Image (cartoon, rainbow, N blue to C red):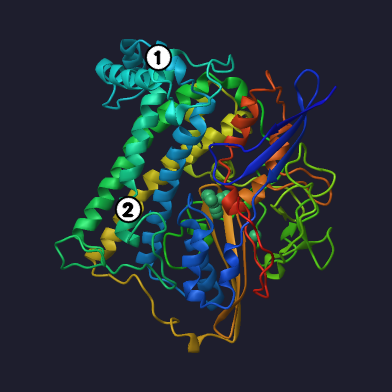
Amino acid sequence: MTQRVVVDPVTRIEGHLRIEAETSPGGEITGAWSSGTMVRGIELILQGRDPRDAWAFAQRICGVCTLVHGIASVRAVEDALDYQIPPNAQLIRNLMIGAQYVHDHVMHFYHLHALDWVDVVSALKADPKATSALAQSISSYAKSSPGYFSDVQKKLKTFVDQGQLGIFANGYWGSPLYKLPPEANLMAVAHYLEALTWQREVVQLHAIFGGKNPHPNFVVGGAPAPISLDADTLAATSVNVQGLEIVKNVIARMQAFVNEVYLPDTLAIASFYKDWFRRGEGVGNFMTFGDFPEDGTGDPSKWLIPAGVILNRDLTTIHPVDLNDPMQVQEFVAHSYYGYSTGKDTGLHPYDGQTNLDYTGPKPPFEQLDVAKDYSWLKSPRWKGNVVEVGPLARVLMLNAKGFEPAVELTQKALRQLDLPLEAVYSTMGRTAARTLESKIVADQMSTWYDALIANIRKGELAVFNDAKWDPSTWPSVARGVGFMEAPRGALAHWIVIRDGKIDNYQAVVPSTWNAGPRDEAGKPGPYEAALMDRHTLADPKQPLEIQRTIHSFDPCIACAVHVVDPQGEELTQIQVR
Ligand code: NFE
Ligand code: MG
C-alpha cells in the first residue's frame, strides 16, 4: 500500500511550507508535492506610491534575504527611467550584496541545514583531544585546541543534563541516518555556536553603507551614504575612513571564516554522505539572471555571475534570458490558489501579472492536500515553459560553463578531494556544496570591489549618487522596467509600471517561487517536487530526515515566495492570522 507522509511545517526555513510525499511499501518516494501554506499582502501597499519609495516597502517582503528586494526594486525603477548610477554606487551595492551572500549562506549551513547531517547528542561522546586533531587536520583555524572543544562539550552537556536542549531540541538524534563520528559532530556543533557570534559582527558592513541591518537603506540613483574624506569619527550619515576600515576588516573576517571553517566543514561533512551526491537533483534545468556589475556601463559580459539558462545539464549551450519578453517568463496558477481572468491554464508575464486569491483547498484542519486541484499559495513560474532551478547550484554551473577560472578550479578541487565525478554536483549535496563554493568566490571578489572603491576615492572620485533623474517632472508619463539580481536563493526580479510618477503595477518573482512552486498546467513538477522524486527512500516515515535534507538543500524562503499584487490596488481579501 502506498503511504502519504506529511511534513508540516517544514522547520529551519523562513516562512510556512508543507511537503507531502507518497511512498511505496518499501519507503521509496513516488510522488511529492510542495505547498506554500501562507499568503501575505505586503505589495498591495506599493500601488499608487512614489516609485522612489518602493524599495523600502518591497524590502519587507522578507526578513532573511534582508536587502535583495531593496536592490531589485531600485534597479527596476532605474531600468524604467534609464537612470545610470555612479561606479562607486555599483561597487558599494556589490559589497552589500556580497556580504548578504556570505552571511546568509553561512547561517543557512550551520543554523538551518547542518542538523540534517550533524547529530548534536552524539557530540557528547566525542573525545575533545581527537576532535582537536581532526579540526587541525582539515584547517588552520585558531580555535581548535582540546580545551576549546572540551568547553563546548561541557556547555552542551549542561543543556542535555537540564533536559533543555533549547535550540537543539526535537532533532531526530540517534537516527542511523546520521553518519558523522562523534568528533566531527562536536566540531560542527562548536562551529554552529561560532557562526552565531560571527554573523552578528559581519553585518556591520551593511550598517556602514546602508545605516543599519537588517533592511539597510538604499536610494534610486545610487548609494544612500555619501563618502566623506574629512570626518575622522565614525559618522552615521557618511562613509569615512573609519567606516571603510571596518568594511575591510569585515571582508577579511568573512574570507577567514569561509576558508578556515565553512569550506573545510562542508567538505568534511560531505565526505561522510557521498550517497547524497547521487539523489535529489530534480529537473536538470538551471537559470541565472546575472549579477555584480563592476562598472557603470551595464555591460552583462562584465558581470561576475553571467545570465542564462542551462537545459538538461548541457553546459555547452547557454540560452539567453530576456526578462522583457512576454513569452519567456510566465507565471502559471493551474495548481495555485489563484484565478486568472485569462483562464486557469494560461501563463502571464509579470508586467501583466494578476493575483486574484481563490482558495479552493479543503477547510483546515485537513489530512491531505487535494493535489489533483489547487494546493499552494505559490505560483509556478516557467522559462519558455520549462521548469528551471535557480540558486547557488545554477550559478556555480553557469560560472563553470562560462569558464570562470576561480570557479572551475574550486569545483575541480572539491570533486578531487571527495573523489567524485562532475555529475555529482547534480544532487542534494551538490546543491549544498555549491552554496559553499560560491561563498568563497563572492567573498574573494569582495576584496576586488573594495580595492576598486578605494582606488576611485584616492583619485578623488567620490560620487555615489546621480541626481539626473531624481525629479519626477523629467520622467515619461508611462515607463516600465525590470530590476533583477542574484539573491542568495537564486534569480530574483521585480517588474514595475510607472504612470504619471506613481506605481501602476508591481510584480516580484522570487527564487523560492521558481524552486518551491507546485505543478504547472502541463503537470510538470516544480524543482522541490522533482528533487524529492529523484531516488529518495525513507528509512523511517516517522522521521523523514531524507525529505528535510533535500528540501533544506534549496534553503527555502516561503515569505519571499508568496506575496500578493493587485494591479488596481484594491483590497483582495481579509486574512485572519492565527
Ligand atoms: Ni526570503 Fe529571498 C533570497 C529572495 S527567496 S530569502 O535569497 O528574493 O527565495
Ligand atoms: Mg509574485
**Quick check: marks 1 and 2 in contact, CB under 8 Å?**
no
Residue at image position (56%, 75%) is 80
* Percent position of residue 307, x then y: 58, 54
Picture coordinates of residue 572 (x, y %)? Answer: 69, 67
| Quadrant for the N terminus in the image | top right
- x 65%, y 45%: residue: 389
Tell me which residue sits at (69%, 42%) in the image: 527
Residue 409 visible in rendering: no
Amino acid identity at mark 1: Leu
Q: Determine whether the residue tagged by mark 2 lies in a helix, strand or loop.
A: helix
Callout 1: 10 Å neighbours few (<14), some, many (20+)? many
Residue where numbered disc 2 is placed? 205
Which image quarter: residue 207? bottom left
Residue kind at label 2, given as amino acid type: Leu
Residue 176, numbered circle: none
Element type at marker 1?
helix
The residue located at (47%, 41%) in the rendering is 438
**Left or right: 2 as drawn, with respect to 152:** right
